[in-house]
Amino acid sequence: MGIVNVNDDSFSGDGTLEIGAALERARWQAEEGADVIDVGAESARTNRAAVAVEEEVRRFREFFASWPEVVARARPKDGEQVWPPVLSANTWRPEVVEAVLPCGVELVNDMGGLPDDRNARLCAGAAASLLIMHSVGEPKVPHFHQQWDDVMGAMEAFFEEKIALALAAGLPREAILLDPGIDFAKQRDDNLRVFRELGRLQRFGCPVMVPVSRKTVIGEVLGIADPRERDAGTVACIAAAMNRGARMVRVHDVRAGWQAVKMLAAV
């Protein structure tokens, strides 16, 4: 899963409000092997205010309107790649989800933790898939002081509840993906434990997507302040996640990610 930020405050410094530049980045990611293009129109950073619904929808629609023409000029990396790549909308507000699903979106990457069934119902009605991220509280609000006695036990209980909510809303199990929410309402040791015990999530029978790219935990372990210098640590996290059952990883550097996944599969 390649990351495309149509905003100007991405933590990794790769966001842009220029739709043409965002489209070219997405095309590059597709040609470097991305099976999914995950487009976000606002940063998940908690030290930035949420973008207005109307502005978020405008950014999405401008990107999605031009994407078919752009991807038509691209070529897949190899015969195993999903082509054309799945189009994912990284958003959490139901008003935005409803507005962008008709734009060719096949996956909603919901960092909101599914507090109610609205996004699940919208995805079910559009025959789209839903990626549910583990966190606590509302998005765009810092949860730096969240403490867990048992982060994995709490995560399993969380996904038990959210999967049941999504199923009751009409979403089939095969359309549900799980995200352990690395760095979201978690401290360094929590994140490391999630990587070590990721295999526990296999019991739900839903694919697990791990957001590994340039995360704060990598910077904390390696002493690297600049997120753009964390790609080697990201590759290590890709290996750890795949070896514990992850079916998808979310990355900024698709070229390095594709090479890591391809080599791990070969060996």
Image (tube, rainbow, N blue to C red):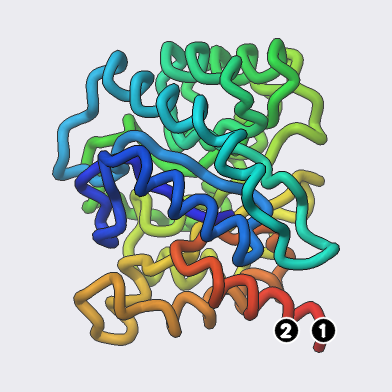
Residue at point 64%, 79% (across, down): 259
Residue behind mark 2: 263
Pick the quarter of the image with the C terminus: bottom right
Q: Quadrant of residue 257?
A: bottom right
Residue behind mark 1: 266
Q: Amino acid at mark 1?
A: Ala
In the image shown, does 241 or 115 lie closer to the viewer?
Answer: 241
Pick the quarter of the image with the N terminus: bottom right
**Left or right: 119, with 191 as reference point:** right
Residue at point 46%, 15% (across, down): 94
The reply to whether discs 1 and 2 touch (Cβ–Cβ < 8 Å) is: yes
- Residue 262 can be seen, yes or no: yes
- Residue 161 can be seen, yes or no: no
> Is the residue 99 above or below the residue 139 in the image?
above
**Left or right: 96, with 46 as reference point:** right
Q: Quadrant of residue 46?
A: top left
Across and down, in percent, residue 156 comes to 62, 46
In the image shown, does 166 or 41 lie closer to the viewer?
Answer: 41
> Is the residue 52 above or below the residue 260 in the image?
above
Q: Amino acid at mark 2?
A: Met
Across and down, in percent, residue 29 comes to 54, 59
